[in-house]
Image: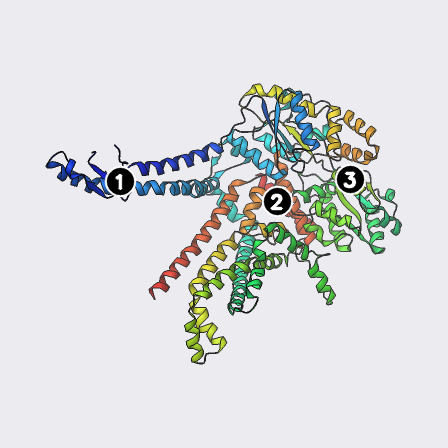
């Protein structure tokens, strides 16, 4: 047998092929089954491994006696990856998830309820917890909340003679916009892009008119959309809002040309550093009072594991993130994330009293998936932002666009 | 067995001297006839195996999975739990019946055809221009490749800024010459035009490179002969360059067609298919269904994707058929 057999080469090549296939199969099946290592996914890739946030995550792992392996990716990607991981049975122990996605993931059965995990969620503000409640069961805890309000450029308002305190309803806001534009400045910028961000920014006006997401073509809803189209038609808002994301909106505001911008808590730092004096007013409801703005922010959720013994440590990690001190620490790490409990909010205001308008806004805010909309919300939202796009671009009248949206939403929900 | 060996190229050689007896060569001869080709075949299969495994893993499986997705009702829940209901062609029927279908199909046709028509025409004009090989032509040609080298997110965002209604440079130029503001990306009348313009700009380098390479293949003697016969530049182009470039043109157009058919990123970044559905193409629609909303709808997205594959395949076959008829003629 000193000569090579004819089959040796095909066998070798076949082996190579088999190992290739095997390698591919193995790489998708890596289960994080290590008892001392807990996996953690969050949507904050901007916070690197040496950031304060990463240290905080590590500290919570150490307190629970384990090490945490953190992976960060952006929000949309995170939701998709969570779904894939659940399908493969390789879910991480903890995910920080954008709140409107919680009900969708909960519906798949891939998340544990707060009861299963042994979490006490009684202290959390009901309006904030609601985004994660499906059929009376709470899935996860909000680690903080943010929402929308109207930033203004104090210099432009002064020049136009507008008193921000006078803005209490839609009519007074529109008057203020008219004064600002008459004075030669630009009125207001917001994001009406054809994505979830567009719906997010439209909802305060929609809810502020008294409209309901189950009834997209109500007269109240039409009034809200007419408010926006009216601003565009009168030149109070730029046409580019149709393609504006919230970031683009903010960049427009930072040019100093706009009197107002609709934006969120996350811009507080940036507003303080702007080249002009800024301030914040609450989004007015149609006939006065504060309109409910949608809540933003992440929930901390625990996906179902095959090994139920892991839950105990997972619970301790989650609790570490959600103590009143923990909430305030998160709020500060994240440049202004309002704590979801009354206790946490008080502690935050003691430390940073200037955040008072934002705490008020968050208390008034409303979850997008609340009112038991749950997994129906994404479909309704898509119909809604499409209607906003149609109306603002002039391809349909507001009433017509919303009528179509209601029909589309009903068709999508079956 | 120790006396019969097969060398590296598969040729059998008899070790006659050490052979066990007179009958051995005959038996060996028979074995040689059957085993050597079989071994060769196994060798061939063995060498092809990595490629076959690769094709199965990265081509056949995804394709099969896409078809599987499209004939089941994959809600998010069914996706995770792995128990989708089989619905046959229901998702395809839903796609065909959707309001967006007609718009998306028409937009896809306009987007693809107009894009490749301009890309090809401009690419060919530039290729002929650079074929003259003047000074700096190499440098200039390299500059024309820049759109190709830029990440799409960069070039698409730049186009979106340039075409911005209020602050875009295009509108400020138009206004400087006394025109009125055009809402490129935000008006349903111009959004498709705007994304086509950006896409043409992106596709020109590809056409330029391939057609320029094709021009190098045309023998210089043909041009010399034509020049001697007194053919004008225009005649040389239409009677020599264009016909001789036909096979290269066909490949360029086919590849351009398939590339353009599945463009998502440019449109998504510039308009997300909007306003409304004004710049929605089939590929963007598929992406929107699967990843553009908070609620992934993989089944209709896969159905639209399969539709695109079929369209691309049809044009691929048309191309093959055309090529065969040219070869025959």
Compute the Cα span from label 1 to label 2: 66 Å
In this rendered view, identify the residue nearer to me: A34 or B69.
Answer: A34
Image disc number at residue A269: 3
Estimate how packed mark 1 is, as few (under 14), some (14 to 19) or many (20 or more) residues with alpha carbons within 10 Å. Answer: some
| Mark 2 lies on residue | A407
Q: Residues within 10 Å of mark 2 (few under 14, many from 20)?
A: some
**In this picture, residue A19 sits left or right of residue A174:** left
Q: Are marks 2 and 3 on the same chain?
A: yes
Contact (Cβ within 8 Å) of mark 2 with mark 3: no
What colouring style does the render use? rainbow
Residue depicted at x 75% and y 24%: A324
How far apart in space, not on screen, are marks 3 and 1 (Cα)?
73 Å
Q: Considering the numbered disc 3 on the image, is that residue within a helix, a strand or a loop?
A: helix
Task: Residue A130 in the image: state x and y as whole percent.
Answer: 69, 30
- Mark 3 Cα shell of 10 Å, populated few (<14), some (14-19), many (≥20): few
Q: Quadrant of the C terminus of chain A?
A: top right
**How far from the left and from the top, in percent, is residue A195?**
64, 45
| Callout 1 and callout 2 share a chain | no
Q: Which residue is mark 1?
A: B39
Chain bearing tag 3 is A
């Amino acid at each position: 047998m000193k000569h090579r057999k004819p089959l040796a080469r095909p066998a070798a090549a076949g082996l190579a092929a088999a190992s290739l296939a095997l390698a591919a199969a193995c790489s998708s099946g890596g289960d994080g089954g290590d008892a001392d290592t807990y996996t953690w996914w969050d949507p904050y890739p901007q916070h690197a491994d040496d950031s304060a946030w990463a240290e905080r995550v590590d500290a919570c792992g150490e307190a629970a006696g384990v090490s945490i392996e953190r992976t960060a990716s952006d929000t949309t990607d995170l939701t998709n990856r969570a779904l894939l991981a659940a399908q493969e049975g390789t879910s991480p122990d903890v995910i920080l998830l954008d709140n409107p996605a919680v009900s969708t993931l909960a519906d798949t059965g891939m998340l544990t309820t707060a009861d299963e995990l042994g979490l006490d969620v009684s202290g959390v503000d009901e309006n904030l917890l609601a985004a994660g409640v499906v059929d009376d069961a709470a899935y996860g805890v909000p680690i903080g909340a943010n929402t929308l309000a109207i930033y203004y450029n104090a210099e432009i308002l002064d020049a136009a003679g507008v008193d921000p305190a006078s803005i209490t309803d839609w009519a007074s806001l529109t008057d203020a916009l008219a004064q600002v534009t008459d004075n030669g400045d630009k009125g207001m910028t917001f994001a009406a892009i054809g994505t979830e961000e567009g719906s997010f920014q439209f909802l305060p006006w929609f809810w502020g008119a008294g409209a309901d997401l189950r009834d997209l073509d109500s007269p109240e809803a039409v009034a809200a959309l007419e408010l926006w189209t009216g601003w565009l038609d009168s030149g109070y808002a730029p046409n580019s809002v149709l393609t504006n994301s919230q970031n683009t909106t903010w960049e427009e505001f930072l040019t100093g040309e706009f009197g107002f911008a609709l934006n969120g808590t996350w811009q507080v730092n940036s507003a303080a550093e702007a080249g002009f004096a800024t301030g914040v007013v609450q989004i007015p409801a149609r006939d006065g009072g504060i309109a409910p703005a949608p809540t933003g922010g992440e929930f901390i959720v625990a996906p179902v594991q095959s090994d139920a013994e892991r839950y105990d440590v997972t619970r301790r990690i989650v609790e570490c993130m959600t103590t009143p001190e923990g909430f305030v620490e998160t709020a500060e790490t994240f440049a202004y994330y309002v704590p979801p409990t009354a206790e946490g909010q008080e502690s935050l205001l003691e430390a940073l009293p200037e955040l008072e308008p934002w705490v008020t806004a968050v208390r008034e805010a409303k979850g997008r998936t609340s009112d038991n909309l749950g997994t129906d919300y994404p479909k309704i939202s898509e119909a809604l932002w499409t209607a906003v796009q149609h109306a603002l671009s002039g391809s349909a009248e507001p009433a017509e666009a919303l009528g179509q949206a209601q029909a589309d939403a009903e068709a999508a929900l079956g | 067995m120790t006396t019969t060996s097969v060398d590296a190229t598969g040729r059998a050689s008899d070790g006659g001297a050490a052979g066990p007896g007179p009958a051995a060569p005959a038996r060996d001869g028979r074995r040689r006839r059957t085993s050597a080709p079989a071994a060769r075949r196994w060798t061939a299969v063995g060498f092809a195996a990595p490629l076959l495994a690769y094709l199965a893993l990265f081509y056949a499986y995804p394709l099969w999975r896409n078809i599987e997705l499209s004939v089941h009702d994959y809600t998010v829940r069914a996706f995770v739990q792995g128990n989708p209901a089989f619905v046959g062609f229901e998702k395809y029927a839903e796609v065909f019946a959707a309001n967006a279908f007609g718009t998306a199909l028409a937009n896809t046709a306009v987007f693809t055809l107009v894009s490749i028509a301009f890309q090809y025409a401009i690419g060919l004009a530039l290729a002929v221009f650079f074929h003259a090989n003047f000074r700096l032509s190499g440098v200039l040609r390299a500059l024309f490749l820049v759109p190709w080298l830029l990440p799409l997110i960069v070039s698409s965002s730049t186009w979106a800024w340039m075409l911005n209604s209020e602050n875009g440079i295009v509108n400020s130029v138009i206004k400087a010459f006394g025109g009125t503001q055009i809402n490129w990306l935000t008006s349903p009348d111009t959004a498709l035009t705007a994304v086509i313009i950006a896409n043409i700009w992106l596709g020109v380098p590809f056409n330029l490179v391939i057609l320029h390479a094709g021009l190098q293949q045309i023998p210089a003697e043909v041009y010399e002969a034509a020049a001697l016969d007194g053919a004008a530049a225009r005649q040389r182009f239409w009677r020599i360059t264009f016909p001789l470039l036909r096979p290269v043109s066909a490949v360029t157009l086919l590849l351009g067609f398939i590339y353009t058919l599945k463009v998502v990123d440019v449109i998504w970044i510039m308009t997300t298919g909007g306003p409304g559905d004004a710049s929605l193409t089939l590929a963007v629609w598929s992406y929107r269904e699967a990843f553009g909303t908070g609620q992934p709808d993989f089944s209709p997205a896969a159905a639209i994707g399969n539709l695109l594959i079929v369209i691309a395949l049809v044009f691929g076959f048309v191309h093959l058929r055309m090529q065969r008829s040219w070869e025959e003629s």
